Image (cartoon, rainbow, N blue to C red):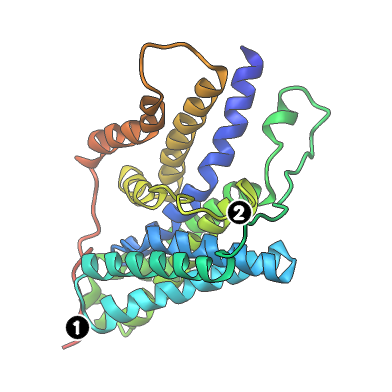
Amino acid sequence: MELFLVNLIAATLRVSTPILLAAIGETFTERAGILNLGIEGIMFFGAFVGFFVADASGSLWIGFLVAILSGVLSGILMGLLSVSLGVNQHVSGLGITLLLTGLSLYLFRLVYGGRSTPPSIEPFQQLTPFNDIPIIGPITQQYFLTYVTFLVIIPLAWWILYRTRFGLNIRAVGENPEALDAAGVSVYLIRYLTLGIGGGLMAAGGAFLSLASLGAFSHGIISGRGWVAIAIVIFGNWDPIRVMIGALIFGGTNALQLRLQAMGLQLPIPYETFLALPYIVTIIALVLAGRNASYPAALLKPYKRE
């Protein structure tokens, strides 16, 4: 039982990492008043770009950095549509998801379509800093990107949002962009910056899957994680720490269903029930927390300077 719990905790941290990266990125964009429904497509595109560049260059880190850059550019595209042109944010985001998903699949078939076996690369290796210590060793056997996500990105995101002038401007533009504009701060610039930051984090989440978890790229590599990330942002009330808790809940449930399937338990329910379990738990958590969510006042509202 102890071994089961230790492995479950370790798996929870790994499974939570890509969703947490994407959710933190969405937290930034929604705090600035932009709902980026392109998150699923940006994650998918980041997974493909990271895999392709790593495969072509022979460097996982170059692939990961280029994937982040692709996410930043995708966020800027979302800004062009929703901020500069004032296109409906739902339409803009869904359009980006369809565009980037289709583009990724097209390029994947163009580059790898002629191969007889699915392409793969040697993924990032897990670190084992405390491997000789019982219990702690297996739990801390994680990817470097997982360490960075939990120990650097989450505290940094919280500090930026609540302890810096830039974070104050982000929260202000999501609540009252007119007041921020009157104070001499560019609403457009703040929203573009947050969309770029958010897009980079979303793509990093996708690249984590192809460069660390799987070492490969497949059509179902994201599997709705982008939509789950949006739900987790609402569950976390747009706070990085609470968003992390939501990601851990989803990751823990997902890790649990994988463990239960691997154990081969003979239960009178179809295995699809296990696959749906994380999403069911996410929906329940969203329903319970969503009723008291404090939505940014300017969310989904385009801003045009008078």
Q: Which badge, 1 or 2, is on the more N-terminal residue?
A: 2
Residue furthest left as drawn = 306
Residue at 56%, 58% in the rendered image: 207
- Say the numbered circle drawn on residue 53: none
Q: Could you tell me which secondary element the residue under label 2 belongs to? A: loop
Residue 164 in sight from this viewpoint:
no
The Cα–Cα distance between marks 1 and 2, rounded to whole angstroms, is 48 Å
User: Residue 250, percent across and down?
Assistant: 43, 36
Query: With 36 as the anchor, is 254 left or right in this view?
Result: right
What type is the residue that disc 2 sits on? Pro
Residue at 54%, 73% in the rendered image: 69
- Say the numbered circle drawn on residue 304: 1
Quadrant containing the N terminus in the rendered view: top right
User: Residue 25, percent across and down?
Assistant: 44, 60
Residue 10 in sight from this viewpoint:
yes
Is residue 85 placed above or below 27 in the rendered structure?
below
Query: With 120 as the anchor, is 277 left or right in this view?
Result: left
Residue at 62%, 32% in the rendered image: 10
Residue at 32%, 81% in the rendered image: 80
What type is the residue that disc 1 sits on? Lys
Q: Quadrant of residue 67?
A: bottom right
State the residue in front, 285 or 298.
Answer: 285
User: Residue 90, percent across and down?
Assistant: 22, 64
Mark 2 closeness class: few <14, some 14–19, many ≥20 residues within 10 Å: few
- Residue marked by disc 2: 118
